[in-house]
Image (cartoon, grey):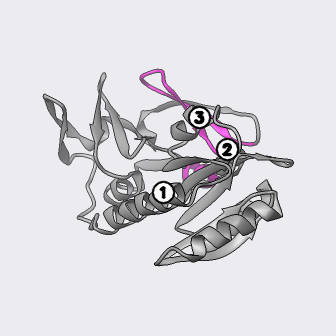
Amino acid sequence: MMRVLIVDDTRLARQELRTLLAVLPGVECIGEADDVPAAQQAIAKLRPDLVLLDIQMPSGTGFDVLDGLDSAPMVVFTTAYDHYAVRAFEANALDYLVKPVVPERLAAAIARARERQVAIAVEAPREMLGPEDQVFLRDGERCWFVALHEISRVVVDGNYARVWFREEKAMLARSLSALEARLDPAMFFRANRNTLVNLRMVKNIDLAVGDGYDLTLKDGSVIEVSRRQARELRERLAL
């Protein structure tokens, strides 16, 4: 069963989506939210598989909803405007539906979400890797053996994860959550919903806007630690 949360500030829009979802097999609408805070609370409480997320709301945007989460569900944006499409896919949205939502397009988006759900389910956990363990990475025609301690960060890139190491990077057809399950939590820290960072690669920690932190790595890259994760980072690094 695909558990779906609807987020839209317009009651009629929410009702329309409910009606469209009701005729789709294996889909359950588990709730609604009409603004940014309510959406974040509903996601945290209900843990939906998929969120149909409006972009423009009086209290903020759909992007603000996602920015306040450390672990986001699958997202399909719904909006009356098509000029947000690029940013939506940069936010790793599964799909982008322009209002009024066409039933066939919604059905296709749900089908895509179901494929992603199945793919995640079959990513069976394997033995956790230690700092000195080597992994084989391949990107196109290039291949590497890389020790875990050489990896500086792992970043979501669409449906994949990009691994940064030495002065190289490689794309893996694995979800960030699946990779996180295999990496030593004492070394790799979830800085935000899109990034795992190797704490041994951190050179400087600076305060950031909104009670978060900016981590400067040894390779010069800067990783933002979300406000929600900042407390965990302080506890982990405290004497």
Distance between the Cα atoms at labels 2 and 1?
A: 19 Å
Distance between the Cα atoms at labels 3 and 1?
A: 18 Å
- Residue under numbered circle 1: 109
Does the image show residue 181?
Answer: yes
Does the image show residue 43?
Answer: no
Decide which of 69, 32 is in the foreground and name it. Answer: 32
**Which numbered circle lies on residue 63?**
2
Residue 52 is drawn in which quadrant? bottom right
Where residue 10 sits in the image (x, y, percent)? 82, 58
Q: Nearer the viewer, mark 2 or mark 1?
A: 1
Callout 2, which amino acid? Phe
* Magenta stretch: includes residue 219: yes
Distance between the Cα atoms at labels 2 and 3?
A: 9 Å
Is 134 on the left-hand or right-hand side of 162?
A: left
Label 3 residue SS: helix
- Residue stretch rendered in magenta on the structure: 211-239
